[in-house]
Image: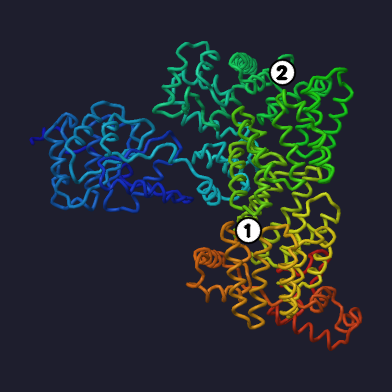
Amino acid sequence: MMQDQHIPPRRRVPRTKVTIPDPPPDLVSRPRLLAALDEAGEHALVFVGAPAGLGKTVLLAEWAARRRGAVAWVSADAEDDDERLFWSAVLEALCGCARIPAGNPLRSLAVPESPGTDLAFLATIADALDTVDEPVLLVLDDAQEITHPGTWRGVRALLRHQPSGLRLVVSSRLEPPLPLVRARVAGGLVEVGVDRLRFSPEEADALISAIGPGIPPHQVGLLVSRTGGWPAGLRLAAASAARQGNLADFFAGRDRAVLDYLTDEVLAPLSAVHRDLLRAISICDEVPVGLAAALTDRPDAEALLRELSEPARVVHSGGTPPRHRVPPLLRTYLRAELLRRDPDRTRSLHAAAARWFAEHDQAAAALLHSVRSGNTTRVGELSRRHAVPLFLGGEHNVLRLALAVLGERRAVASPLLALVSAALYLERGEPTSAESQLSCADAAWPAEPEAELTVLRQLVRSRLAQVDRGPAQAVRAAEQVDEHLAADTGLSGLATLHRVGVLTARRDRASARAALARVAESAGDARHHFLATQCLVTLSGLAGSDGDYREMEALARRVQARHAAHDPHRSLEGAQVSAQLAYGSLLRGEAAECVEHAKQIGRMLGDAPARAAANLGLIAETLRGAAEFELGGWHSGLRRMRRARTRLGTGRSFSAEHAAWCAVLEHRAALRLGAADQARETFHWAQPIITGSGELLLMRARTQLRLGRQGAASAVLRSLSEDGAPMLLPWSGIEASLIGVRAALAAGAPERAVRSLDDALRAAGPGDVRFPFVFAPSDVIAFLTARLGKLGAGERFACQVLARRRESRTPPMPAPLTERERNVLRLLPTQRSIDEIAQDLTVSPNTVKTHVRGIYAKLDVRSRRDAVAIALRRGLLDTEGIDLPR
């Protein structure tokens, strides 16, 4: 091929243009996406397509860095509309790749004046690539910058040659003019798009941890939801938190740096018409077909939305009929900017949206936009007409906003709205405010109330008893709910749900489950999401009481999934679900997971004053303490359980079942750590609450075994079996069998130990109850391990238990301090002398010295000061009032 003497062989290319970019210092590796790119081994084309800020370049740079010598990198820019510059860069990048041998024609090939139409030039490249031993990965990054058809014409022509030594990888915000459709159909395309590029909560957590502190871990899930997993959004959030100290401005759309980024990177490439359409529809979370035209008075609004949907993906569209959504972070900032610059237009848009939704029978959206438009008359009309179905549908935040707009005077003048307001307060755990609203409803009560109003008052009173009274009062209040009167109202399902409490109190669980299943199904058909969720929560609790812990967790996760996209807010329902998940995690032997769920309970409850909220909080503390104990926080975990129990008190505001597992968990931990006094205290607390239960016998057997009385322990276990004392906790029988294993081993009765182990495995396997095994004493684990290969049906479960125990890596439990040693330890920080301590404890100084030596040995220290410091660190001493000895 002849080269014009006036045209240089190639254009000069900046080195940075053909160099793989360095990864950011806070890189979060994404193995799942790297694996997807590795699938390109036999594919001719890879397309990484997504809008700005989704990490396309970072991903490809990490992938390319792992394959150095096989990658030719070109960072595209607007100058690549010059074909000669583009092909010069391509050749320069290829020549920098180790897979192109020294004598390959690519290293000396000149670039003609019109390379995209020079078939000889393109054929030479294809032939040269065909000769390489292994394919070269040619990465074309930021390909949306290339707009000249001639440049793309040459790339398409090269792909048509299908050189065996080339794999083309294109990264672009827009779909490039390449034969992608044909490649998809032929199976010759690997795609990594928006949905795959979004950060998962785990990846987001890793990114935020790498960037630096400032965002609490419990806010990561909300942040992922608000940003849609957009990597740039997560980085902007971290920067905002660093500047402001929190995420308030970021979430409210007030952070100027975020607005500038969105304006420059997302909005600037769009036309003025597109930008105005986005501002208008930003007032809505979702935009059904027809609404955009109503908001903008543009008949072509749907066509414009389709343009924004593909390929730019500034708007996401899906469903049948389609619904359009602006990405959540962009929507927040567009909405905030619209309100700041043009509040009158904002109100007009909300009013138009309210009319449209009302005309299309979408009451929640109509009410919400009426609230935001400031039309209180319309808010009142819609609230009175739709309050009950909206409450059942779970639109509680919308109702709270509406009632706040109406104000106290207007809301309480309507007994219906006062009752709905009371019901909303109860779901937040605020009984005093609910009782006030009940009083207002009574004061405005009509002479001839409609059936729905009467039933609603009964239901509110029943819920009040559930939330802030004892179990017996809750049953009596549920008995007052008139199911026959409710039958012809929209509240029939909720009435049945409340009456289920009467069935469970009568131990008629089968009827209760059947009734709940019927209500849940009908509620789902009617889109009464709150009612359906309440049924699932109750079914989950029943499953846990029956020992079907797999079902309990499955149902609880279904409820949790319903809330995943919503902001966390105070909710008894949410706290109850988190408690069920924490309980399930602990029973599966996942102690760390249990701790996280238990923390979530506290966040859900906030400072809710209701008795049910207090009980849930204390139950959460017990679960967290038990989990922390098994993770190695023995003393702090045990102290946490004791605090929770003492705050629960001895009243009957909680169920016997809850008392049983609080007692069993604390008693177990106390004995294992040698805290005999606390074990006795726990037993005496539980005795009047769970009298006659098998759990009391279990604790007695455990105590006898701890005292070395194997025969007495076995005798208690026999009476437990023969007398048929009812177990309040289905898994207590597993614990009893394992105590039997230990007693039999200590008594030298291996056959009895085998029977007890088989019983425990048989009972634990179906419900996946690993906790008693995973955290069992070493003698039980040694016996279980020795029995491997002889366990029959229990073999698989035993292997899972042992694997989980290895994964947990719980540190060995220290030798427990005796009660006397603990008493001496408590006095060490006081700086009393040995003689003074002896006088306080009414023992001899030599006895105190013996105890001090025992303390030093068990804590592995040599001084009084070190003993106090270690004891504080391990949680053996309270921190208040401690003055370290000098």
State the residue at coordinates (67%, 82%): 747
Identify the residue shown where x is 76% and y is 67%. Answer: 697
Location of the C terminus (image quadrant): bottom right
Q: Which residue is mark 2?
A: 385
Amino acid type of the residue that numbered disc 2 sits on in the rendered structure: Arg
Q: Vertical placement of 886 versus 551: above or below?
A: below
Q: Position of residue 293 (x, y in %)?
A: 51, 14
Q: Residues within 10 Å of mark 1 (few under 14, many from 20)?
A: many
Q: Residue furthest left?
A: 2
Element type where label 1 sits in the image: helix
- Provide the secondary structure element on which disc 2 rests: helix
Q: Is residue 563 left or right of residue 668?
A: left
The numbered disc on residue 587 is 1
Corner quadrant of residue 357: top right
Q: Give the camera-side residue of 838 and 766.
A: 766
102 shown above or below 813: above
Please give left or right for residue 852 compared with residue 281 in the image: right
Q: Position of residue 393 (x, y in %)?
A: 65, 29
Residue 774 in sight here = no
The residues tagged by marks 1 and 2 sit, at their Cα atoms, a distance apart of 46 Å
